Amino acid sequence: MRRMVAENPVVVMGRRGCCMCHVARRLLLGLGVNPTVCEFGDEAAGEAVALVEELPVVFVGGRLLGGLDRLVAVHITGELVPILKEAGALWL
């Protein structure tokens, strides 16, 4: 997991079939970002949930941004695009 986060500008991790993971991915795609998506099965999701409080989890530039609520919040405030540019995920 650490390697994936370090090697990709944007990573979305969540449970397989999770609608919130889909929403996070669609938001990023709508901005022109193609995130790396890592989906866990039920067993692996249980281990991942032990590490974080909520899924999906979004990493940008190798750092934890947060869950869907944080992703939407920084998008609404206009902070998301600069964060994505700094991480090399957007070339606007």
Image (cartoon, helix red, strand yellow):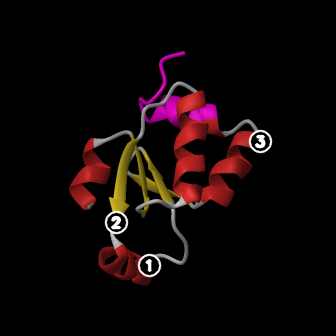
Give the secondary structure at mark 3: helix
Q: Which of the two discs, 2 and 1, labels the residue nearer the N terminus? A: 2
| Within-10-Å neighbours for mark 2: few <14, some 14–19, many 20+ | some
| Within-10-Å neighbours for mark 3: few <14, some 14–19, many 20+ | few
Q: Residue furthest top?
A: 92
Q: What residue lies at 36% left-to-right and 59% top-to-bottom? A: 39
What's under tag 3, amino acid-wise? Ile
Which mark is nearer the camera, 2 or 3?
Answer: 2
The image quarter in which residue 82 lies? top right
Q: Residue furthest right?
A: 77
In space, the residues marked 1 and 3 are separated at their CA atoms by: 26 Å
Give the secondary structure at mark 2: strand
Label 2 sits on residue: 40
> Bounds of the magenta span?
81-92
**Within the magenta stretch, is there residue 91?**
yes
Residue 50, compared with residue 32, is above or below; it is below
Residue 76 has which mark? 3
The image quarter in which residue 63 lies? bottom left
What's under tag 1, amino acid-wise? Val
In space, the residues marked 2 and 3 are separated at their CA atoms by: 28 Å
Residue 21, compared with residue 46, is above or below; it is above
Label 1 sits on residue: 49
Left or right, 78 with respect to 58, comes to right
